[in-house]
Amino acid sequence: MTFASPRAVLDAYIDGSRRLDRDVLARCFHPAAVMSGDLDGQLIAGTPDPFLDDVAGMAAAGVDHSGFTAEISELAATGRIASGTVTSRGFGGRFDFLDRFHMIDSDGWLIISKVFTTI
């Protein structure tokens, strides 16, 4: 599944994060996507798969995610590329994140890279 606009991808990413829905989140990423960042002092680099697995684990464990909030704070597109920033609070009941995304339009918009840090 692809999305009609960069905003639609980020809106789906926020919705999937809010619902701890691995499937929705996985549909936001291009098959060749990379993800890296600082998770509370631990540097991570690779694919989105560990993140998606963590989300599925939290959902299966019944993690209280009722305090989660997120918003798009930046979004820019030129031609078939875009960048955006999402700030979220209370992920997994304990983490606040600043996520920066790059997106491409490959017959629909998808996230090609995500870099993040806890804040």
Image (spheres, helix red, strand yellow):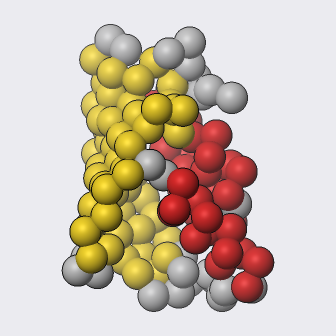
Choose between 63 and 14: the one closer to the eye: 63
Q: Is residue 59 above or below residue 52?
A: below
Assign the C terminus to one quadrant of the image: bottom left
Q: Is residue 22 above or below residue 95?
A: above
Side of 40 relative to 18 (left or right): left
Residue 55 lies, in percent from the top left, at 61, 68
Picture residue at 32% right of the left edge, 74% below the top: 39
Picture residue at 35% right of the left edge, 69% below the top: 97
Q: Quadrant of residue 94 in the image?
A: bottom left
Choose between 97 and 29: the one closer to the eye: 29
Choose between 40 and 99: the one closer to the eye: 40
Choose between 103 and 76: the one closer to the eye: 103
Residue 1 shows up from this direction:
yes
Picture residue at 50% right of the left edge, 15% below the top: 106
Residue 86 lies, in percent from the top left, at 37, 55
Q: Quadrant of residue 116 in the image?
A: bottom left
Residue 15 shows up from this direction:
no
